[in-house]
Amino acid sequence: MAYLLLVVEPIHQRAGRSDDEGRARYEEMANYAATLKERGVLVACESLKSTREGVRVEVRNGERRLIDGPFAEAKEMVGGFLLLNCDTREEAVAIGAACPAATWCSIEVREIGPCYQ
């Protein structure tokens, strides 16, 4: 079964850390991802840049609208993701709990499936 682990972090968290702290956390996550790859459960993972560089796209009544970041109403942002292939939800939750980012962010565990369910 496929699970997506979303790394959800406070929107201003990155601004409060030094470059060295940020690089150390990035390296910690890269090492964790390498262990998941060795175990054969990691399909893909990526870090995402801040919402400052982001844009939202909406189409309403045939009209495209772009909304540039930062997004004032947001208190959190998706800072990255891990796509897993696990046997059970419990295994995905355990991987999320062991993720280093769980100590400074929230890890949202979502099963991949049709959106109508």
Image (cartoon, grey):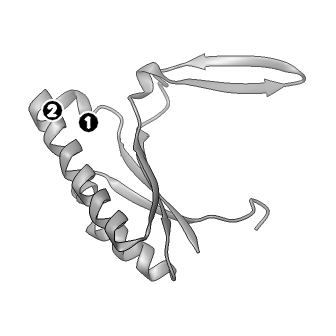
Residue 1, x across and y down, in percent: 59, 75
Q: Residue furthest right?
A: 61
Which corner quadrant of the image does residue 61 belong to?
top right
Residue 6, x across and y down, in percent: 45, 53
Task: Please indicate whether residue 35 sits to the left or right of residue 24 in the image.
Answer: right
Q: Which mark is residue 13?
A: 1
> Is mark 1 in CB contact (under 8 Å) with mark 2?
yes
Spatial distance from mark 1 to mark 2, Cα to Cα?
7 Å
Task: Please indicate whether residue 113 sits to the left or right of residue 31 in the image.
Answer: right
Residue flagged by tag 2: what amino acid is it?
Answer: Arg
Kindly identify which residue carries mark 2: 17
Mark 1: give few (<14), some (14-19) or many (20+) Cα within 10 Å: few
Give the position of the C terminus as an image quadrant. bottom right
- For image coordinates 48% across by 65% down, the residue present is 84
Residue 20, x across and y down, in percent: 9, 32
**Mark 2 residue element:** loop
**How many numbered circles does the render carry?**
2
